[in-house]
Amino acid sequence: MKPERVACVVGARPNFMKVAPVHAALRARGVQVRLVHTGQHYDDKMSAVFFDDLGMPRPDAFLGVGSGSHADQTAKIMTLFERDCLDWRPDLTLVAGDVNSTIACALVASKLGLAVGHIEAGLRSRDWGMPEEINRVLTDHASDLLLTPSRDGDANLAAEGIAPWRIRFVGNCMIDSLRTHQARAVALQPWQAFGLRPGAYAVATLHRPSNVDDPAQLAALVAALADVAAQLPVVFPVHPRTAARMRSAGLAPPAGLHVVEPLGYLQFLGVMARAAVVATDSGGIQEETTALGVPCLTLRANTERPVTLTEGTNTLLGTDPARLAPAVAAVLEGRGKAGRIPEGWDGHAAERIADAIAAGFDTLLERSTP
Ligand code: UD1
């Protein structure tokens, strides 16, 4: 069966840059694509700006679910996406990444007996305390077509008993977006807005519940950023979750930090591309810094993206914020990782995804097969 009607689901900020190139590649092959935005992220700075920056058309359907507890948000997405599926009847639903919108829509389509493809399949942190890990594992097992960004993904899926014919190594389509927009983003020189020079500043982002929901950990991280700011200026675009937690913990941003609202895709890409070092707890930024050759210090106990450690520029610092300032100093002394570009991070992953879909997948739909 060759899918002629494909529903592409987006919901939260990290989805947009993964789905944009796939959406374009499918349309270029004449596939009818319905872009469904769940509304998990809804602020202009978390959503609308990405459609403009990535040149992605407005969604065909906007479910408008908004924020809520995990159960509330997931349930709302499921109810509304089920109606959309019953209405439009996609031959294939494509979900991306590991957010609540991903698992919610994968579950809906699979229970309606409709085919599901998962972009960024197979990643594992083995940390069941992370909501995203639950979303990843369950989405993979509810999906028919598992599109992996790195070879560790293939191995993880095989180890969980997923049949090899459901797994397709396609590479990292988020890097397609990065390569498409990198030159334009740098040409904007977005660091000038903060009075900074290229190569002479750091970038920090924090939003993982494990870092920002615990007031003591958040306070220690903000203090660690102040220690970094004593070495070089730091641009700190603050996620709405983090901003809310800082407010409720009464934490004032320390001096020397450029504390700003979330940046758009092009602005952030340009700022990141010319940073001396990036400190983050994001998943995607670990990969983007590897693609850009910028040293990345990850403030987490684990990563589901080990290729960024073994091949890329990423260093896993663990959860002790006191490790950050010395690690930044080491990078500034020239001891940051240089890294190399992992296999399949070549700017053409979306074409391989569209090829895999266009080739049809009759064997995958034999749901009785293990
Ligand atoms: C979600 C994803 C996370 C991803 C992150 C990227 C899940 C479980 N988590 O986390 O994997 O790394 O997005 O940003 O899906 N808020 C706004 N405006 C918005 C969106 C959110 O103000 O447009 C605020 C709300 O107070 C909300 C909070 O941020 O309660 C958290 O949003 P939510 O979508 O639940 O999770 P994220 O932390 O954004």
Image (cartoon, rainbow, N blue to C red):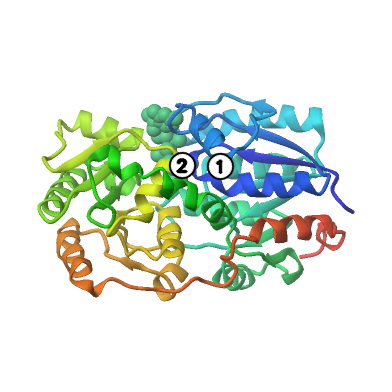
Name the foreground residue: 129 vs 268.
268
Residue 229 rendering spot, x and y as whole percentages: 14, 50
Residue 23, image quadrant: top right
Q: For the point 49% across and 32% down, which residue is it?
A: 49
Q: Nearer the viewer, residue 21 or 282?
A: 21
Left or right: 226 with respect to 339?
left
- In this view, the mark in front (2 or 1): 2
| Amino acid identity at mark 1 | Phe
Badge 1: few (under 14), some or many (20 or more) residues near its Cα, within 10 Å? many
Image point (44%, 56%), residue name:
128
Quadrant location of the N terminus in the rendered image: bottom right
Q: Is residue 75 above or below residue 370?
A: above
Q: Are marks 2 and 1 in contact (CB under 8 Å)?
A: yes
Which disc, if any, is residue 16? 1
Residue 367 placement, left or right of 69: right
Point out residue 92 in the picture as x, y percentages from the top left corner: 78, 46
Report whether 85 appears left or right of 161.
right
**Mark-to-mark CA distance, 2 and 1:** 10 Å
Looking at the rendered structure, the secondary structure element under dot 2 is helix
- Residue under label 2, please give it: 265
Q: Residue at x 85, y 57 (%)?
A: 360
Check disc 2 and give the amino acid type.
Tyr
Q: Residue furthest right?
A: 1
Decide: few, some or many residues near mark 2? Use Cα within 10 Å; few <14, some 14-19, many ≥20. Answer: many
Q: In the figure, residue 286 lies in which quadrant?
A: bottom left
Q: Is residue 182 visible?
A: yes
Q: Position of residue 337 (x, y in %)?
A: 32, 73
